[in-house]
Every structure is written in structure tokens, then in C-alpha cells.
Image (cartoon, rainbow, N blue to C red):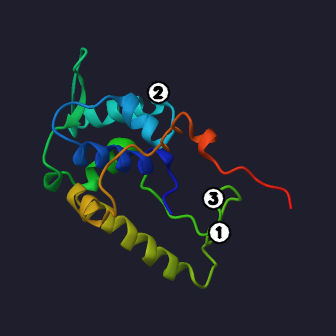
Amino acid sequence: MITSRRLGYGVCVLYELATRKEGYHSARDIADGYRVPEAFVRKILLDLRRAGLVTAQKGRTGGYRLAHPPQAIKLGQLVKALEPDTPRLVYGRQRGGGYVPGEDCPVQGFWKGIEETFTRALVESTLADVVDRSRTPSRKRAPKAKAQGTAARRRKKTRK
């Protein structure tokens, strides 16, 4: 799918800001929810702020929020903010390098067409489209901590 972690998590960051309650939200909360380093999320947010997609406020009640309503934010703007090159599809496992059709490949036209459709969909889609197509409302992605005393309530195994 998308070859860049920055772009993938950039969509997640914007999604979180679009679906959370009004106000500013910290990079730490967003990073913890996806179990990625806070510094990585901060770099993404810095690039999004430079592109005018989010605003930032310093201080105890500060953080980040969307600069525009989700309907006004095109994913093409996100791509431009986070990716120096046009994102490419990987055909197969990314770690193994995937399949890259060469100039002499007879099905290169097919794969190029798919890639163009993918790129066009990114450019034309809005953040509101992402929110509408998502299955669950925003909430912390990390698993809940176990409550104390749960071990004592477990059934004891009996020998037969």
C-alpha cells in the first residue's frame, strides 16, 4: 500500500484531530494511542503546521488542532506536506522490496494505471472522507490496563 510511514501516520494524526473533542490535543496522547514515538508524531505535526493544516498553542492547555474543517482539508495537501516525492504503491512485501515493474514488463501499464488511480484518489479525497469511512470513533488505541484484583477473581484450576 503506502510506502511511507510518515504519510500513513499523517492520515492517522489528522483523523485523531478531526474526531476528538474541540480544543488542543498533545502529540504525546496521539503518539501513545498508536504506539509510535512522540518525536515522530511531533515531526509530522510540525510539517502539518508549516503547511497550514494544523495550528499549535504552547502551554499547559496547548497542543494541536485542525486549522480548517475536515471538509476543507484535501489529502493531497497532506501528501505535499509530508512527502518530497509522489507516494508509490508496493506490489508485494515492502521489506523484501516488492515487485517493481520494469520498462520491458508486459503488465507495466496495468500497474501504472492502478498507481495513477491511487494517487488521484489521495489528491481528491478530503479528511471528511477519511472520517466517514472509518469504522469506530476516535479513542485511545492502546489496550486498557488490567484492573487490580483481577487475578484473585480468576477461577482456580482443579486437578482431576
- The amino acid at mark 1 is Tyr
- The amino acid at mark 3 is Gln
Q: Work out whether residue 1 or residue 159 is closer to the camera in this orientation and state it.
A: 159
The residue sitting at 44% across, 70% down in the picture is 115
Tell me, yes or no, whether the two marked residues, 2 and 1, touch with CB atoms within 8 Å: no
Work out which quarter of the rendered image holds the C terminus and state it: bottom right
Residue 50: numbered disc = none
The image shows residue 93 at horizontal and vertical percentages of 65, 63
- Mark 2 Cα within 10 Å, few/some/many (few <14, many 20+)? few
Q: Work out whether residue 104 or residue 96 is closer to the camera in this orientation and state it.
A: 96
As measured in the structure, the alpha-carbon distance from the residue carrying label 2 to the one carrying label 1 is: 32 Å
Judge from the rendering whether residue 29 lies leftward or rightward of residue 19; answer left or right: right
Judged from the image, the secondary structure of the residue bearing numbered disc 3 is loop
- The amino acid at mark 2 is Ala
Judged from the image, the secondary structure of the residue bearing numbered disc 1 is loop
The residue sitting at 61% across, 72% down in the picture is 101
**Residue 33 occupies which quadrant of the picture?**
top left
As measured in the structure, the alpha-carbon distance from the residue carrying label 1 to the one carrying label 3 is: 9 Å
Residue corresponding to mark 1? 99
Tell me, yes or no, whether the two marked residues, 1 and 3, touch with CB atoms within 8 Å: no
Judged from the image, the secondary structure of the residue bearing numbered disc 2 is helix
Residue 94: numbered disc = 3
Residue corresponding to mark 2? 39
